[in-house]
Image (cartoon, rainbow, N blue to C red):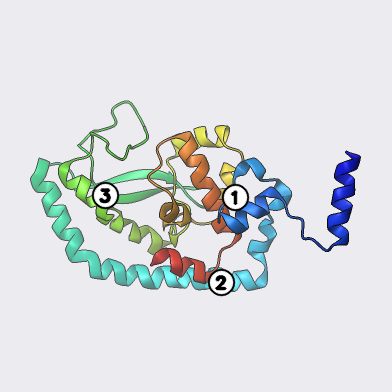
Amino acid sequence: YDNFLSKYSYLISENTEIISASKWCERNLQRIPVEYLNKSDFDFDALLNPNQKISWRLKRFGDILVSFFLLLGSSPLIILSALIIRIEDKGPIFYSQERTGLYGEKFKILKLRTMKNNSEPDGAVWAQSKDPRITRVGRFLRKSRIDELPQLLSVITGEMSLIGPRPERPEIEKLLIKEIPFYNYRNTIRPGLSGWAQVNYRYGASIEDSKLKLSYDLYYIKNFSILLDFMIFF
């Protein structure tokens, strides 16, 4: 211990910057693992300062504007996809699913159906990347992300943002909150159509995957900027 104090004092005398493990990960890995996170490391008051308020308002304005034009431009694609879904198995074109949003509020998203009808008779389960319940058309729609386009309506109404943590199903989120520290931090901002975790990590289908993706979501929340949103969007 005395040896540690001696080395610590020496580093301070040499003006060496000493940072926490969470800060090192944030700078070098662009994610914040929950193993190294303390409540004192995460200052939510920073999200409410005057400069950030302007950024969040610009984000909301951009969400509405971009989503409107994206929805307008992609409407022929949505209509064509809807017809193909109907032809394949005569089932419903869209499906609605409850998700957890800002501050834990529940809302419903609308997606083009990519799974066989009545594919969850026993309740909510994680979808796998090669899930046998996915239809042939659905596989293409998922790979191209066309199935997500109807969620632009939720962005326009304010339940979602273009960029942010992906909204989780309430049944699964209850489990994740119990198993993963700080998991509910991701609900301090609007959920997104895409996010920092989505562009940095593969399709998640387990508690470990969710834990790693949370580390990217925490980085995004702490380092939010319009520039970062642009980078994720493109």
Image coordinates for residue 119, horizontal then vertical, percent: 25, 33
Circle 3 is placed at which residue position? 142
Q: Is residue 164 above or below residue 129?
A: below
Circle 1 is placed at which residue position? 32
Q: Is residue 234 above or below residue 132?
A: below
- Side of 9 relative to 51 (left or right): right
- Say which quarter of the image contains residue 68: bottom left
* SS at circle 1: loop
- Side of 166 relative to 17 (left or right): left
* SS at circle 2: helix
Image coordinates for residue 195, horizontal then vertical, percent: 45, 56
Circle 2 is placed at which residue position? 55
**Is residue 188 something that shows in the picture?**
no
Residue in the image at 28% along x and 27% along y: 121
Image coordinates for residue 84, horizontal then vertical, percent: 11, 51
Badge 3 crowding class, 10 Å Cα cut-off, few under 14, some 14 to 19, many 20 or more, is: some
* Comes first in the chain, label 1 or label 2: 1
Q: Nearer the viewer, residue 229 or 120?
A: 229
Residue in the image at 18% along x and 40% along y: 135
What is the three-letter code of the residue carrying label 2? Ser
